[in-house]
Image (cartoon, helix red, strand yellow):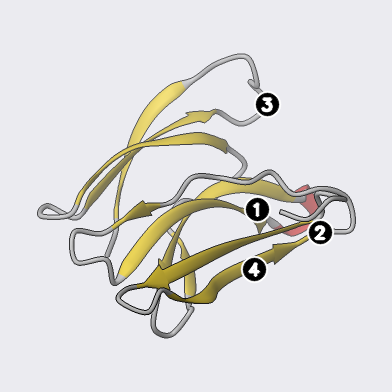
């Protein structure tokens, strides 16, 4: 995250030389809300929370799957709910558990699950 807090990046460093590269960079004209990342068991992909545009309704925070090699970002959740955190990722069964505020109910939190494939 930079000083103005309008850019955040996921930087992945590899040993033994500890070379680092940006895996994903998020920019916004306002501010960026950084999110923890959760790596797959083989470390080839990870999950994070990112804003996803839902037509005229605007941006909503969703669970996104990021491929480290191709840098492709795929939203796993959709709609006008706001994901607040990723609870767990069952790599073996391809299930992601997350907490979210339902549409137009920001004070509520529900637990959901979604497939990662």
Taking the spot 30% from the left edge, 76% from the top edge, the residue there is 16
Q: What residue sits right under mark 2 in the picture?
A: 28
- Location of the C terminus by quadrant is bottom left
Vertical order, 16 against 91 (above or below): below
**Among numbered discs 4 and 1, the one appearing first in the sequence:** 4
Above or below 86: residue 107: above
Considering every residue shown, the one lying at the far top of the view is 107
Q: Residue at x 48, y 78 (%)?
A: 72
- Compute the Cα span from label 4 to label 2: 10 Å
Q: Which mark is residue 25?
A: 4
* Residue at numbered disc 1: 51
**Residue that label 3 marks:** 104
In the image, farthest residue toward the front: 17
Given residues 56 and 72, the one toward you in this image is 72
Rounded to the nearest angstrom, the CA distance separating label 2 from label 3 is: 24 Å
The numbered mark, 3 or 4, whose residue comes first in the sequence reads: 4
Label whose residue precedes the other's in the sequence (2 or 3): 2
């Amino acid at each position: 995250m930079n000083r103005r807090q309008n850019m955040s990046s996921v930087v992945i460093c590899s040993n033994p030389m500890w070379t680092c590269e940006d895996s994903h960079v998020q920019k916004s004209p306002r501010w960026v809300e950084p999110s923890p990342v959760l790596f797959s068991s083989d470390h080839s992909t990870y999950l994070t929370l990112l804003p996803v545009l839902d037509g005229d309704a605007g941006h909503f925070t969703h669970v996104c799957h990021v491929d480290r090699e191709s840098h492709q970002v795929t939203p796993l959740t959709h709609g006008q709910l706001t994901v607040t955190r990723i609870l767990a990722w069952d790599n073996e069964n391809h299930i992601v558990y997350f907490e979210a505020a339902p549409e137009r109910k920001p004070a509520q939190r529900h637990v959901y699950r979604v497939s990662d494939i």
